Amino acid sequence: MKNNSPLFKDTSTHRLPYITLFVLGAIILVLVYIGYDSVLGSDKNELTKANKLKNEELISDKLPDVALSSIEVQKDVVIEDENTSDSTAKSSKDLEAQKKEAEAEKILVENTKLPEGKIHIYVVEKGETFYGIANRFGLKFNQLKSLNPSVDPEGLKVGVTKLNVKVKAVHTVGPGDVLRVVAEKYHVSKASIMIVNHKDQDVTLRGEQLIIPLN
């Protein structure tokens, strides 16, 4: 006897829609996942490409800076080389200037160093200058100045100004002392004796005092 009571109906027909819905839902989830992964993968590839392009752009942007930095470094090296050259040239000039100064001082010392001889008092005569008197007695200007530090070379007064000069000797003329003989005795020239003693003739007088110059 067949029971048609609702309590005893077959439940398999009721489960079928749920199973179908579950399967459809699973399929939908799989499709969604696949689609999302595909989209996401595409986005990842695009993002990777974009990052790569961006990095390349950054590198290309930095290349000029690197090149400029290299140029600046080279420029600094060139400037440093120029500064070194300038410093070397300046040192050479300074050394040359020091040498010239030392030579000038040496010459000054030599021109000031007094020769050996006797001090003789000389009275300035008409037309004479400080330089001319120094030359007459075989002295240099600075030597005569060192012998007369208080005398103004531009303020010489005839018959008044007395100058200290260096001479080899003061010779008193004796018998037979002609100028040639006197010059030979002191190893100087006859002309220099005549110049120092203001002689225009080769004449000597007994008892006369002749100034014998240094040369």
Image: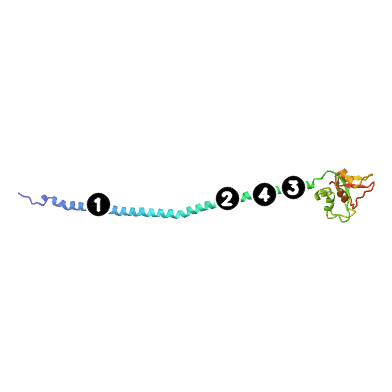
Q: Of label 3 and label 4, which has the lower sequence position?
A: 4
Q: Are marks 2 and 3 in contact (CB under 8 Å)?
A: no
List the residue tagged with mark 3.
Answer: 105
**Amino acid type for the residue under numbered disc 2:** Asp
Which residue is depicted at the point 24% across and 52% down?
A: 30
Q: Label 4 neighbourhood size at 10 Å, few (<14), some (14-19), many (20+)? A: few
Question: Disc 2 and disc 3: Cα gap in Å?
Answer: 36 Å
Q: Of label 2 and label 4, which has the lower sequence position?
A: 2
Numbered mark located on residue 30 in the image: 1
List the residue tagged with mark 2.
Answer: 81
Question: Disc 3 and disc 4: Cα gap in Å?
Answer: 16 Å
Question: Disc 4 and disc 1: Cα gap in Å?
Answer: 92 Å
Question: Disc 1 and disc 2: Cα gap in Å?
Answer: 74 Å
Is 71 left, or right, of 207 in this rendering?
A: left
**Amino acid type for the residue under numbered disc 4:** Asp
List the residue tagged with mark 4.
Answer: 94
Q: Are marks 2 and 4 in contact (CB under 8 Å)?
A: no
* Residue lying at the far left of the rendered structure: 1
**Which element carries disc 3, helix, strand or loop?**
helix
Along the viewing direction, whichever of 123 and 200 lies nearer the viewer = 200
Where residue 207 appears, as percent x and y from the top left, is: 95, 46
Which residue is depicted at the point 16% across and 52% down?
A: 16
Q: Are marks 3 and 4 in contact (CB under 8 Å)?
A: no
Q: Is residue 89 visible?
A: yes
**Which element carries disc 1, helix, strand or loop?**
helix
